[in-house]
Amino acid sequence: MRFEEAYGAWSERRLTQEEAAQLLGVCERTFRRYIDRYEEEGLAGLTDKRLEQVSCHRAPVDEVLALEALYRKRYEGWNVQHFHERYREHHQGERSYTWVKQRLQEGALVKTAKRKGRHRKRRERAPLVGMMLHQDGSTHEWVAGQRWDLIVTMDDATSEVYSGFFTEQEGTWSSFRGVRETLNKRGLFSSFYSDRGSHYWNTPQAGGAVDKQRLTQFGRAMEQLGISMIAAYSPEARGRSERLFRTLQDRLPKEMELAGINDMQEANQFLAKRFWPAFNRRFKVCAAESGSAFVPLLGVSLDDIFCLKAERTVRRDNCVSYQGKVLQIPKTKGRCHYVKASVQVHEYSDGGMAIFHGPRKLARYEATGELTAQGSRQEVGDAA
């Protein structure tokens, strides 16, 4: 669906290839390949045929092992260029410098050089609303004597703020709330741009690249929704958010002082009812293209996406331990017991919990760990 939408917009000259590729989360070159395959074979042509094939150019394992053994035995400590010359001249090697370097780096025999600085260019706004959303937080003395975090979720195309609220501390729950409010207002968007905060990304080395395989709870939720995440590696990369907060830090405290606000609950009501509508009228800009990349949410339970999830194994007494609480799985007619079964515990924003076995919810619990009477009757009835 996303490809046909992007292809149609490109065919009608409403989007460039670069913008259409961004909508799909791929590079321009990949998008051009998609176009060729789509025009030749239709949607079936977009299936990646490489998934079950082994490259005919792949080097035999014995050759790779022999190369590593040669380096360890006689040339340890040599730089790759020097070793490659010796490899070609004295050992009849036929592989390229790049191939040799990659094999030695994969075997941890030589270090990977630091990436050179690349040429940067100004990034234009996304052409359609819903193609990219920014989320960021700012800690500031918004009210005299009190420092709160302001969490803002805005559209890259127009700078319209879809969600903005104060909280004691930025984290997973505040990020969930910002995205959820946006989804409820506008629908599903394409990509999400943020800093490398620990609630957004796992970063193995401080200041280094993010790990896109080991997802945080927030990353898992975005993956479930099909929203691609983009990490910013410098304050300059988040320039739009940085400029927004400079404006907010100048204007918002004065507005709240004028309104006589000094309580967080009152401040959030002021933001929702008065400040954001006026702010968006003043600072919102028109998108480069008409239309929208937002798509409606159909049949999606946001409660079971924007929650904390953890795998557990059921004990012999049909109980599960979670965060110091013992959750008893009630008896159902669908199965005798769940001993040793792998289940998933969902923790919701109100502190309540639920246990799932595959897609099936077994029970719902209060924040104290007590089984809710309604949840128990409902699940037993469902099983029947």
Image: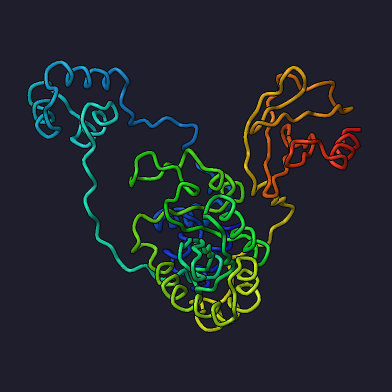
Viewer can see residue 131: no
Residue 322 lies, in percent from the top left, at 66, 32
- Left or right of residue 367: residue 111: left
Q: Quadrant of the N terminus?
A: bottom right
Give the residue displayed 70% in from the left and 19% down from the top: 340
Question: In this orientation, which residue lies closer to the viewer: 317 or 179?
Answer: 317
Query: Of all residues shown, which one is farthest toward the front?
Result: 145
Q: Position of residue 169 (x, y in %)?
A: 53, 55
In terms of image quadrants, where is residue 342?
top right
Above or below, comparing residue 73 to residue 276 in the picture: above
Q: How is the image coloured?
A: rainbow
Determine the residue positioned at 15% across, 15% down.
Answer: 73
Left/right of residue 135 with respect to residue 102 in the rendered view: right
Is residue 301 visible to us here? yes
Height in image: 336 above or below 55? above
Give residue 355's quadrant in the image.
top right
Observer-nearest of 101 and 51: 101
In the image, residue 181 lies at what x, y percent?
64, 62
Give x and y (percent) for residue 140. 45, 65
The C terminus appears in which quarter of the rendering?
top right
- Answer above or below: position of 53 versus 117: above
User: Residue at left 36%, top 45%?
Assistant: 209
**347 left or right of 278 in image:** right
Residue toward you, 32 or 236: 236
Q: Which residue is pictured at 64% across the width and 72% down the height?
A: 272
